[in-house]
Image (cartoon, rainbow, N blue to C red):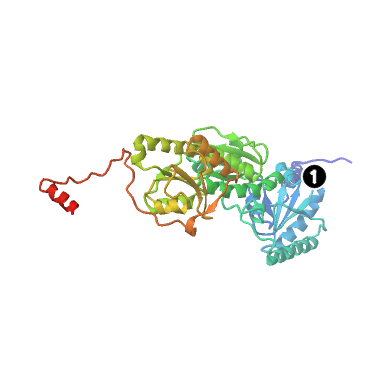
Amino acid sequence: MKFILTDGYILVLIFLLGTVSCTLFLAVNGLYSASDDVIELTPTNFNKEVIQSESLWLVEFYAPWCGHCQRLTPEWKKAATALKGVVKVGAVDADKHQSLGGQYGVRGFPTIKIFGANKNKAEDYQGGRTSEAIVDAALSALRSLVKDRLSGRSGGYSSGRQSRESGGGDKKDVIELTDDSFDKNVINSDDVWMVEFYAPWCGHCKNLEPEWAAAATEVKEQTKGKVKLAAVDATVNQMLASRYGIRGFPTIKIFQKGEDPVDYDGGRTRSDIVARALDLFSDNAPPPELLEIISEDVLKTTCDAHQLCIISVLPHILDTGASGRNSYLDVMLKMAEKYKKKMWGWLWTEAGAQSDLESSLGIGGFGYPAMAAVNARKMKFALLKGSFSEQGINEFLRELSVGRGSTAPVGGGAFPKIHTVEPWDGKDGELPVEDDIDLSDVDLDDIWDKDEL
């Protein structure tokens, strides 16, 4: 049999072939369109749409060339339409977005996962591939989610770090950073920043999060906000991850103004993180202030704001002069610098200026110079028993640092009245000037005569 192709037939054939080619092109480049109720998901929008959502999600991971995926497509579309406004139904081209499929362990197509209360623990869907079976499974998962919320076991989330929200520790002091907010907050800051780069699906990140959250609160309190703990979702903020060469999760980097960031390679417990943060703080912190107790406000403000306040009672200025007093103050300043990581308050007063305070601390008007370490929250104190020297004070404070040493309650259970006094002017003391007495008109013989009587 022979076929004779005229110009008309050739045109028809070209049209038919073009239609088939177009159909094949569409078939291998996506199974869903914008007109469908199936939401197309990509690495760019996945975290925002799914992970940060409070909704229940059914997500299909597919490959356009996969025959099983092509047969599922009409059923998936029907289910999406039926569940519209109730359950979110999405789809990921895992052939095109292999990294996203890899995050969720996708090994074959189609793979369907249910993202419920804890978006970091997606469940595999093992049901039938009809729209009815899909809808039934979605409603069953939704019912379980609602019951869990009703019983208070779980709930919706507004952050990509679901485990932090669901009982892994209060993360209120962990600062969430993004591509847009990072430079303004970190690069231009005078504070020290410890930044964790994480991925929501990363198991090690989930293990770290309660330790990181607890450390953030403690570090904020102990450094008065001068060292900050932050977190960056590196799967969403990919510009930052690329800039700092993030290759694994979690990665923690330390940022200090004017210096290149360095990797944190310490332990992952709260105590490890806090210890490193305090080291960073002490390296960058100014020397502690040494304040004279000239009013009640100075004492109360200092002792209420610190775990311990170290109070020294120095000899009267007439007993030591300015040089002697300055030598004592220098010893205190050296100790304050040595122990500045402890975030203690440092105070001094002159013997006799605050006698009620001396009595309440068992100093009692003699034995100057003296020193007491006071815990204002517990209203207990410990007295320096050794010499008022660098060695003696260091031994005293070292014992306190490790929880040793004897303590006693503050007399009266509270600080006594503090007198308002003039601050020391830095000069030597002077004896009070006595008034001259004019004895020219006094008859001393009369005095002797009276004595004889």
At 70% across and 45% down in the image, what residue appears? 202
Where residue 80 appears, x then y in whole percent? 72, 59
At 81% across and 57% down in the image, what residue appears? 129
- Whether residue 18 is visible to the viewer of this picture, yes or no, is no
* Residue that carries the numbered disc 1 in the rendered image: 107
Where residue 286 appears, x then y in whole percent? 46, 38
At 66% across and 42% down in the image, what residue appears? 268
Where residue 99 appears, x then y in whole percent? 71, 42
Q: Nearer the viewer, residue 30 or 183?
A: 183
> What is the crowding at mark 1: few (fewer than 14 residues within 10 Å), some, or many (at least 20)?
few
Q: Quadrant of residue 117?
A: bottom right
Quadrant for the N terminus in the image = top right
Q: Nearer the viewer, residue 345 or 17?
A: 345
Q: Quadrant of residue 319?
A: top left
Q: Nearer the viewer, residue 386 or 437?
A: 437
Quadrant for the C terminus in the image = bottom left
Q: Nearer the viewer, residue 348 or 4?
A: 348
